[in-house]
Amino acid sequence: AERAGIWANVADDTELCTFHLPSRVRRGALQLSIGSAGEAPFVVRRLRQAMERLFGPEWAPWMGGAARFRQAVRGLSLSRSEQEARYDAFFEETVDPRTFKARVLTAAEERSLLSAGMGASDPVEGGGAR
């Protein structure tokens, strides 16, 4: 197949493969992929299942909110470091670092982050991801 320029994927025999497909978790625009180059597909399957639990369905609307926030930040004509500070604040406010639960900002919270650039420091106690 390789000499003929034909792509081949034989999942059970990596020597016969000319390419490998990663396992994918999709939550709206968020795509997480993992692979093992065909060496341990059983591990990949279990890790994908763990990622499906870790990144729940709330990540699809969160990605939409993140895209809107990015566009709003880009419209502010800020320096790159000021943009990054806003993005850091957005992530800290909306994603719980212990559980990876995500939430969409309210319009008021988004305005606050856009105008001040910083939200509460604790994502759980300060109104962050729940």
Image (spheres, grey):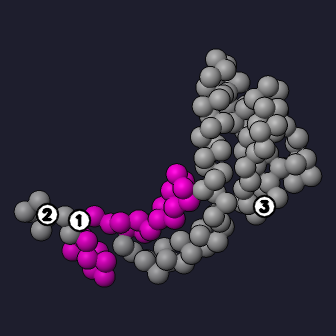
Numbered tag placed on residue 6 in the rendering: 2
Nearer the viewer's eye, disc 2 or disc 1? 2
The answer to whether residue 113 is seen in the rendering is no
Query: Amino acid type of disc 2?
Result: Ile
Does the magenta run of residues contain 15?
Answer: yes
Residue range highlighted in magenta: 9-37
Residue plotted at (51% across, 65% down): 25
Examine the rendered structure and indicate whether residue 19 appears above or below residue 108: below
The spot of residue 15 in percent (x, y) is 24, 74
**Which quarter of the image is occupied by the N terminus?**
bottom left
The spot of residue 85 in percent (x, y) is 73, 31
24 to the left or right of 115 = left
Q: CA distance from mark 2 to mark 1?
A: 8 Å
For disc 3, the marked residue is 98
Residue plotted at (62% across, 34% down): 70
Examine the rendered structure and indicate whether residue 29 appears above or below residue 69: below
Question: Dots 2 and 1: beta carbons under 8 Å?
Answer: yes
N-term-proximal mark, 2 vs 1? 2
The spot of residue 35 in percent (x, y) is 44, 66
For disc 1, the marked residue is 18
Q: Quadrant of residue 54?
A: bottom right
Question: Dots 3 and 1: beta carbons under 8 Å?
Answer: no
Q: CA distance from mark 2 to mark 3?
A: 45 Å
Q: Which element is circle 3 on?
A: loop
Q: Which element is circle 2 on?
A: loop
